Image (cartoon, rainbow, N blue to C red):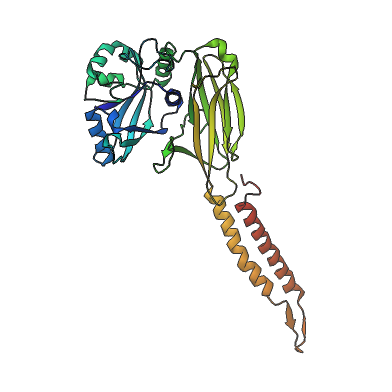
Amino acid sequence: MSFVIVWDTCLEPEYYADLHNVLASPAGTVLRYDYSRKYFDPESLKLFDKLRNKKIDHIEVLLCYGEQSQFDKAKSRIKEDIAVIVPFRLGKVKSAKQIENNEDPTKSKLIYDIEILGYPDLQSYRFYEKKFRTIIGDRKPLKFWHTYIEENSLIEKLLNEATRDEDNWSLIVEELKKLQFCGDSFWRIDFYYDFLKTKKVKFLSNQDRNSSTVSFLETYDEAKIFLDIHYISSHDSQVQNRELLIESSENIIPNKKRIKLRPYSQTSFQVKALTKNHIYNEFGSLEIETKDDSKNTSVYATGAHLRFDILTKIHWPKKIAGIFFGILSVPIILVSSKYPIMKKTAEHVEEFDCNTAFWVFIALIIGTLMFVVSGVILRKEFSIK
Protein backbone atom coordinates (compact mmCIF):
# COMPACT_ATOMS: atom_id res chain seq x y z
CA MET A 1 0.00 0.00 0.00
CA SER A 2 1.47 3.37 -1.04
CA PHE A 3 0.74 6.46 1.02
CA VAL A 4 1.85 10.02 1.71
CA ILE A 5 3.34 11.40 4.93
CA VAL A 6 1.89 14.81 5.83
CA TRP A 7 4.37 16.59 8.08
CA ASP A 8 3.60 19.00 10.90
CA THR A 9 6.40 20.94 12.62
CA CYS A 10 4.15 23.30 14.62
CA LEU A 11 6.30 26.32 13.77
CA GLU A 12 3.38 28.71 14.17
CA PRO A 13 0.65 28.92 16.86
CA GLU A 14 -2.10 27.94 14.42
CA TYR A 15 -0.21 24.79 13.34
CA TYR A 16 0.55 23.99 16.97
CA ALA A 17 -3.19 24.14 17.68
CA ASP A 18 -3.88 22.00 14.60
CA LEU A 19 -1.92 19.09 16.06
CA HIS A 20 -3.98 19.23 19.25
CA ASN A 21 -7.20 19.38 17.23
CA VAL A 22 -6.28 16.47 14.96
CA LEU A 23 -5.32 14.32 17.96
CA ALA A 24 -8.57 15.11 19.75
CA SER A 25 -10.96 14.71 16.80
CA PRO A 26 -13.11 11.58 16.54
CA ALA A 27 -12.54 9.19 13.64
CA GLY A 28 -14.64 10.18 10.65
CA THR A 29 -14.14 13.92 11.06
CA VAL A 30 -13.09 15.59 7.79
CA LEU A 31 -10.54 18.41 8.04
CA ARG A 32 -9.39 20.74 5.26
CA TYR A 33 -5.71 21.39 4.52
CA ASP A 34 -4.06 23.68 1.99
CA TYR A 35 -0.42 23.79 0.86
CA SER A 36 1.49 25.36 -2.00
CA ARG A 37 2.53 22.82 -4.64
CA LYS A 38 6.20 23.44 -3.84
CA TYR A 39 5.74 21.69 -0.48
CA PHE A 40 4.99 18.31 -2.13
CA ASP A 41 7.75 15.97 -3.24
CA PRO A 42 7.42 15.07 -6.97
CA GLU A 43 5.75 11.68 -6.44
CA SER A 44 3.24 12.87 -3.86
CA LEU A 45 2.37 15.79 -6.14
CA LYS A 46 1.63 13.35 -8.98
CA LEU A 47 -0.61 11.36 -6.65
CA PHE A 48 -2.57 14.44 -5.55
CA ASP A 49 -2.97 15.53 -9.17
CA LYS A 50 -4.40 12.10 -9.96
CA LEU A 51 -6.90 12.50 -7.15
CA ARG A 52 -7.75 16.02 -8.31
CA ASN A 53 -8.41 14.71 -11.82
CA LYS A 54 -10.56 11.83 -10.49
CA LYS A 55 -8.12 9.13 -11.65
CA ILE A 56 -7.99 7.66 -8.13
CA ASP A 57 -10.61 7.82 -5.39
CA HIS A 58 -8.43 8.44 -2.31
CA ILE A 59 -4.92 8.71 -0.87
CA GLU A 60 -3.84 7.05 2.36
CA VAL A 61 -1.92 9.47 4.59
CA LEU A 62 0.12 9.29 7.78
CA LEU A 63 0.35 12.53 9.77
CA CYS A 64 3.75 12.92 11.44
CA TYR A 65 5.12 15.50 13.82
CA GLY A 66 8.80 16.42 13.37
CA GLU A 67 10.93 18.37 15.84
CA GLN A 68 14.58 19.34 15.97
CA SER A 69 16.45 18.85 19.22
CA GLN A 70 15.63 21.28 22.06
CA PHE A 71 13.04 23.08 19.95
CA ASP A 72 10.54 25.12 21.98
CA LYS A 73 7.49 26.81 20.46
CA ALA A 74 9.29 28.50 17.56
CA LYS A 75 11.73 30.42 19.79
CA SER A 76 14.26 29.41 17.17
CA ARG A 77 13.54 28.37 13.59
CA ILE A 78 14.45 24.91 12.37
CA LYS A 79 18.09 25.02 11.29
CA GLU A 80 19.09 21.38 11.65
CA ASP A 81 17.76 17.96 10.79
CA ILE A 82 14.56 16.67 12.37
CA ALA A 83 15.67 14.90 15.55
CA VAL A 84 12.33 13.43 16.66
CA ILE A 85 9.53 11.99 14.51
CA VAL A 86 6.18 11.07 16.03
CA PRO A 87 3.49 9.58 13.75
CA PHE A 88 0.27 10.77 15.38
CA ARG A 89 -2.75 10.11 13.14
CA LEU A 90 -3.94 8.11 10.16
CA GLY A 91 -6.13 9.57 7.46
CA LYS A 92 -7.56 9.29 4.00
CA VAL A 93 -7.66 12.16 1.48
CA LYS A 94 -11.00 11.92 -0.31
CA SER A 95 -10.90 15.03 -2.53
CA ALA A 96 -8.52 17.72 -3.75
CA LYS A 97 -8.69 20.87 -5.83
CA GLN A 98 -6.22 23.51 -6.96
CA ILE A 99 -6.22 27.31 -6.74
CA GLU A 100 -4.04 28.65 -9.54
CA ASN A 101 -1.38 31.32 -9.17
CA ASN A 102 -0.74 32.51 -12.72
CA GLU A 103 2.24 34.68 -11.74
CA ASP A 104 4.09 31.81 -10.04
CA PRO A 105 2.69 28.30 -10.71
CA THR A 106 4.81 26.84 -7.87
CA LYS A 107 2.71 28.93 -5.47
CA SER A 108 -0.53 27.45 -6.76
CA LYS A 109 -2.29 25.87 -3.81
CA LEU A 110 -3.64 22.38 -3.39
CA ILE A 111 -6.65 22.23 -1.08
CA TYR A 112 -7.59 18.77 0.13
CA ASP A 113 -9.90 17.13 2.65
CA ILE A 114 -8.59 14.47 5.04
CA GLU A 115 -10.96 12.02 6.68
CA ILE A 116 -9.40 11.42 10.09
CA LEU A 117 -9.02 7.72 10.93
CA GLY A 118 -7.37 5.94 13.87
CA TYR A 119 -4.02 6.30 15.62
CA PRO A 120 -0.84 4.65 14.29
CA ASP A 121 0.96 1.95 16.22
CA LEU A 122 3.80 3.86 17.86
CA GLN A 123 5.36 0.70 19.32
CA SER A 124 5.87 -0.70 15.82
CA TYR A 125 7.26 2.64 14.70
CA ARG A 126 9.86 2.74 17.47
CA PHE A 127 10.96 -0.81 16.60
CA TYR A 128 11.45 0.10 12.93
CA GLU A 129 12.33 3.78 13.31
CA LYS A 130 15.80 3.53 11.75
CA LYS A 131 14.39 1.79 8.69
CA PHE A 132 11.57 4.33 8.56
CA ARG A 133 14.04 7.22 8.43
CA THR A 134 16.04 5.46 5.71
CA ILE A 135 12.94 5.14 3.54
CA ILE A 136 12.11 8.83 4.01
CA GLY A 137 15.64 10.01 3.26
CA ASP A 138 15.88 13.77 2.84
CA ARG A 139 12.24 14.19 1.79
CA LYS A 140 11.15 15.92 4.99
CA PRO A 141 10.85 19.45 6.40
CA LEU A 142 12.05 22.02 5.62
CA LYS A 143 12.42 20.70 2.10
CA PHE A 144 9.02 19.03 1.77
CA TRP A 145 5.89 18.75 3.85
CA HIS A 146 4.49 15.81 1.84
CA THR A 147 6.52 12.66 1.33
CA TYR A 148 5.46 9.81 -0.96
CA ILE A 149 6.15 6.27 0.26
CA GLU A 150 5.91 3.35 -2.15
CA GLU A 151 4.29 0.05 -1.26
CA ASN A 152 6.27 -1.40 1.62
CA SER A 153 5.34 -4.17 4.05
CA LEU A 154 7.35 -2.50 6.81
CA ILE A 155 5.39 0.72 6.48
CA GLU A 156 2.13 -1.18 6.59
CA LYS A 157 3.05 -2.38 10.09
CA LEU A 158 3.34 1.25 11.17
CA LEU A 159 -0.18 1.87 9.91
CA ASN A 160 -1.59 -0.91 12.04
CA GLU A 161 -4.36 0.94 13.87
CA ALA A 162 -6.07 -2.38 14.80
CA THR A 163 -8.70 -1.64 17.43
CA ARG A 164 -6.31 -0.22 20.00
CA ASP A 165 -7.09 3.48 19.60
CA GLU A 166 -7.00 4.10 23.35
CA ASP A 167 -3.56 2.48 23.77
CA ASN A 168 -2.10 4.00 20.61
CA TRP A 169 -3.37 7.48 21.49
CA SER A 170 -1.94 7.25 25.03
CA LEU A 171 1.50 6.23 23.72
CA ILE A 172 1.52 9.12 21.22
CA VAL A 173 0.57 11.63 23.92
CA GLU A 174 3.24 10.30 26.30
CA GLU A 175 5.79 10.82 23.53
CA LEU A 176 4.64 14.36 22.75
CA LYS A 177 4.75 15.27 26.45
CA LYS A 178 8.55 14.90 26.28
CA LEU A 179 8.76 17.53 23.56
CA GLN A 180 7.64 21.17 23.23
CA PHE A 181 4.11 20.12 24.24
CA CYS A 182 5.20 19.64 27.84
CA GLY A 183 2.66 21.39 30.06
CA ASP A 184 -0.23 20.93 27.61
CA SER A 185 -3.48 19.06 28.16
CA PHE A 186 -4.41 16.27 25.78
CA TRP A 187 -7.87 14.87 25.35
CA ARG A 188 -9.86 13.05 22.70
CA ILE A 189 -13.58 12.69 22.14
CA ASP A 190 -16.00 10.12 20.73
CA PHE A 191 -19.70 10.54 19.89
CA TYR A 192 -22.34 7.85 20.39
CA TYR A 193 -26.05 7.56 19.65
CA ASP A 194 -26.69 5.37 22.69
CA PHE A 195 -25.84 5.39 26.39
CA LEU A 196 -24.15 1.96 26.18
CA LYS A 197 -21.71 3.33 23.57
CA THR A 198 -22.37 0.62 21.01
CA LYS A 199 -23.40 2.91 18.12
CA LYS A 200 -20.78 5.47 17.14
CA VAL A 201 -21.91 8.62 15.39
CA LYS A 202 -20.99 8.69 11.70
CA PHE A 203 -19.76 11.96 10.27
CA LEU A 204 -20.84 13.23 6.86
CA SER A 205 -18.93 15.71 4.72
CA ASN A 206 -19.91 18.66 2.58
CA GLN A 207 -17.03 19.52 0.27
CA ASP A 208 -18.69 22.78 -0.84
CA ARG A 209 -18.35 24.31 2.61
CA ASN A 210 -15.74 27.06 2.96
CA SER A 211 -14.43 25.97 6.34
CA SER A 212 -11.48 24.24 7.98
CA THR A 213 -13.89 21.54 9.11
CA VAL A 214 -16.11 20.24 6.34
CA SER A 215 -17.80 17.42 8.24
CA PHE A 216 -20.98 17.37 10.29
CA LEU A 217 -23.05 14.82 12.14
CA GLU A 218 -26.74 14.04 11.84
CA THR A 219 -29.32 13.37 14.50
CA TYR A 220 -33.08 13.64 14.93
CA ASP A 221 -35.21 16.14 16.77
CA GLU A 222 -35.26 15.56 20.54
CA ALA A 223 -32.61 12.82 20.21
CA LYS A 224 -29.68 12.61 22.62
CA ILE A 225 -26.01 12.39 21.67
CA PHE A 226 -23.59 10.88 24.18
CA LEU A 227 -20.04 12.25 24.33
CA ASP A 228 -17.09 10.39 25.82
CA ILE A 229 -13.89 12.34 26.65
CA HIS A 230 -10.54 10.80 27.60
CA TYR A 231 -8.02 13.16 29.17
CA ILE A 232 -4.28 13.20 29.88
CA SER A 233 -2.38 16.09 31.44
CA SER A 234 1.33 16.48 30.81
CA HIS A 235 1.78 18.79 33.79
CA ASP A 236 -0.34 17.68 36.73
CA SER A 237 0.29 20.80 38.84
CA GLN A 238 -1.58 22.87 36.24
CA VAL A 239 -4.67 20.65 36.20
CA GLN A 240 -6.43 22.79 38.80
CA ASN A 241 -6.42 25.62 36.25
CA ARG A 242 -7.61 23.57 33.27
CA GLU A 243 -11.15 22.76 32.23
CA LEU A 244 -13.21 22.11 29.14
CA LEU A 245 -15.69 24.82 28.17
CA ILE A 246 -18.57 23.38 26.17
CA GLU A 247 -20.83 25.87 24.36
CA SER A 248 -23.55 25.22 21.83
CA SER A 249 -26.16 26.95 19.70
CA GLU A 250 -29.70 27.51 21.00
CA ASN A 251 -31.04 24.24 19.61
CA ILE A 252 -28.43 22.11 21.42
CA ILE A 253 -29.11 21.60 25.14
CA PRO A 254 -27.37 22.35 27.46
CA ASN A 255 -26.05 25.55 25.87
CA LYS A 256 -23.10 25.87 28.23
CA LYS A 257 -21.17 23.47 30.44
CA ARG A 258 -17.79 23.31 32.16
CA ILE A 259 -15.89 20.12 32.95
CA LYS A 260 -12.94 20.13 35.32
CA LEU A 261 -9.96 18.23 33.89
CA ARG A 262 -8.33 15.67 36.14
CA PRO A 263 -5.17 13.68 35.29
CA TYR A 264 -5.69 10.46 33.33
CA SER A 265 -9.46 10.63 33.62
CA GLN A 266 -12.52 9.94 31.53
CA THR A 267 -15.83 11.78 31.56
CA SER A 268 -19.13 11.42 29.74
CA PHE A 269 -22.05 13.76 29.20
CA GLN A 270 -24.97 14.11 26.85
CA VAL A 271 -26.59 16.81 24.74
CA LYS A 272 -30.07 17.01 23.25
CA ALA A 273 -30.74 18.33 19.75
CA LEU A 274 -33.94 20.21 18.92
CA THR A 275 -35.61 21.93 15.97
CA LYS A 276 -37.78 25.04 16.25
CA ASN A 277 -40.59 23.37 14.30
CA HIS A 278 -41.56 20.17 12.51
CA ILE A 279 -41.22 21.75 9.07
CA TYR A 280 -37.50 22.33 8.48
CA ASN A 281 -34.24 20.61 9.46
CA GLU A 282 -31.94 22.82 11.50
CA PHE A 283 -28.18 23.23 11.79
CA GLY A 284 -26.56 23.84 15.16
CA SER A 285 -23.04 23.71 16.55
CA LEU A 286 -21.14 22.40 19.56
CA GLU A 287 -17.77 23.83 20.60
CA ILE A 288 -15.37 22.25 23.07
CA GLU A 289 -12.41 24.35 24.14
CA THR A 290 -9.55 23.79 26.56
CA LYS A 291 -9.54 26.72 28.99
CA ASP A 292 -6.60 27.74 31.12
CA ASP A 293 -7.59 30.05 33.98
CA SER A 294 -3.99 30.59 35.07
CA LYS A 295 -2.01 33.68 34.06
CA ASN A 296 -0.73 31.97 30.93
CA THR A 297 -0.30 34.64 28.23
CA SER A 298 1.21 32.40 25.56
CA VAL A 299 -0.33 32.51 22.07
CA TYR A 300 0.19 28.76 21.85
CA ALA A 301 -2.78 26.56 22.70
CA THR A 302 -2.65 24.43 25.83
CA GLY A 303 -5.15 21.95 24.40
CA ALA A 304 -7.64 21.28 21.64
CA HIS A 305 -10.47 23.56 20.53
CA LEU A 306 -13.01 21.69 18.41
CA ARG A 307 -16.23 22.72 16.72
CA PHE A 308 -18.83 20.23 15.54
CA ASP A 309 -21.72 21.13 13.25
CA ILE A 310 -24.90 19.16 13.95
CA LEU A 311 -27.77 18.75 11.51
CA THR A 312 -30.97 18.06 13.46
CA LYS A 313 -33.56 16.43 11.21
CA ILE A 314 -37.29 16.63 11.73
CA HIS A 315 -39.43 13.56 12.39
CA TRP A 316 -41.39 12.98 9.17
CA PRO A 317 -44.35 11.23 10.90
CA LYS A 318 -44.95 14.42 12.92
CA LYS A 319 -44.64 16.63 9.84
CA ILE A 320 -47.01 14.38 7.87
CA ALA A 321 -49.49 14.35 10.77
CA GLY A 322 -49.43 18.15 10.94
CA ILE A 323 -49.90 18.56 7.18
CA PHE A 324 -52.63 15.87 7.12
CA PHE A 325 -54.66 17.57 9.85
CA GLY A 326 -54.19 20.96 8.18
CA ILE A 327 -55.29 19.79 4.73
CA LEU A 328 -58.26 17.82 6.09
CA SER A 329 -59.46 20.68 8.28
CA VAL A 330 -59.94 23.12 5.38
CA PRO A 331 -62.73 21.30 3.47
CA ILE A 332 -64.45 20.34 6.73
CA ILE A 333 -64.58 24.00 7.81
CA LEU A 334 -65.60 25.27 4.34
CA VAL A 335 -68.35 22.68 3.77
CA SER A 336 -69.80 22.87 7.27
CA SER A 337 -69.78 26.70 7.28
CA LYS A 338 -71.86 26.79 4.07
CA TYR A 339 -74.10 23.84 4.87
CA PRO A 340 -77.80 25.01 5.15
CA ILE A 341 -79.27 24.78 8.64
CA MET A 342 -82.73 26.02 7.61
CA LYS A 343 -85.34 23.68 6.14
CA LYS A 344 -88.70 24.25 4.42
CA THR A 345 -91.86 22.85 5.87
CA ALA A 346 -94.73 21.38 3.86
CA GLU A 347 -96.20 24.89 3.81
CA HIS A 348 -92.93 26.19 2.23
CA VAL A 349 -92.00 28.07 5.36
CA GLU A 350 -88.31 28.11 6.36
CA GLU A 351 -87.55 27.11 9.90
CA PHE A 352 -84.44 26.35 11.94
CA ASP A 353 -83.30 22.69 11.77
CA CYS A 354 -81.89 21.92 15.23
CA ASN A 355 -80.55 18.48 14.27
CA THR A 356 -78.69 19.75 11.20
CA ALA A 357 -77.38 22.76 13.11
CA PHE A 358 -76.05 20.46 15.84
CA TRP A 359 -74.02 18.35 13.39
CA VAL A 360 -72.80 21.40 11.49
CA PHE A 361 -71.64 22.88 14.79
CA ILE A 362 -69.85 19.61 15.66
CA ALA A 363 -68.19 19.55 12.21
CA LEU A 364 -67.03 23.16 12.63
CA ILE A 365 -65.55 22.33 16.03
CA ILE A 366 -63.77 19.25 14.64
CA GLY A 367 -62.43 21.19 11.62
CA THR A 368 -61.24 24.06 13.78
CA LEU A 369 -59.58 21.70 16.28
CA MET A 370 -57.82 19.87 13.44
CA PHE A 371 -56.57 23.20 12.07
CA VAL A 372 -55.29 24.23 15.49
CA VAL A 373 -53.66 20.83 16.08
CA SER A 374 -51.97 21.10 12.67
CA GLY A 375 -50.54 24.47 13.65
CA VAL A 376 -49.25 23.44 17.05
CA ILE A 377 -47.67 20.27 15.63
CA LEU A 378 -45.90 22.03 12.76
CA ARG A 379 -44.94 25.05 14.88
CA LYS A 380 -43.91 22.70 17.68
CA GLU A 381 -45.91 24.39 20.42
CA PHE A 382 -46.01 21.04 22.17
CA SER A 383 -44.11 17.83 21.71
CA ILE A 384 -45.58 14.55 20.54
CA LYS A 385 -43.58 11.82 22.21
Q: Hey, which residue is sitting farthest front in the picture? A: 103
Whether residue 128 is visible to the viewer of this picture, yes or no, is no
Q: Could you tell whether 256 is left or right of 50 in the image?
A: right
**Which of 335/276 is in front?**
276
Which of the 4 image quarters holds residue 110? top left
Q: Residue 221: x and y, percent?
A: 56, 43
Nearest to the observer: residue 5 or residue 314:
5
x, y percentage for residue 29?
42, 32
Give the vertical position of 103 relative to 267 (above or below): below
Which image quadrant for residue 250? top right
Can you see residue 220?
A: yes
Residue plotted at (74% across, 72% down): 357
Q: Tell me how many marks there are.
A: 0
Quadrant of the image containing the C terminus? top right
Q: Residue 153 vs residue 83: left or right?
A: left
Point 22% across, 22% down: residue: 152
Q: Closest to the observer: 79 or 255?
A: 79
Instruction: Tell whether 269 sits left or right of 71.
Output: right
Q: Is residue 384 above or below residue 94?
A: below
Q: Position of residue 53 (x, y in %)?
A: 26, 42
Q: Nearer the viewer, residue 111 or 24?
A: 111
Q: Quadrant of the N terminus?
A: top left
| Residue 194 image position (x, y, % from top left) | 52, 32
Q: Which quadrant would residue 104 be assigned to in this image?
A: top left
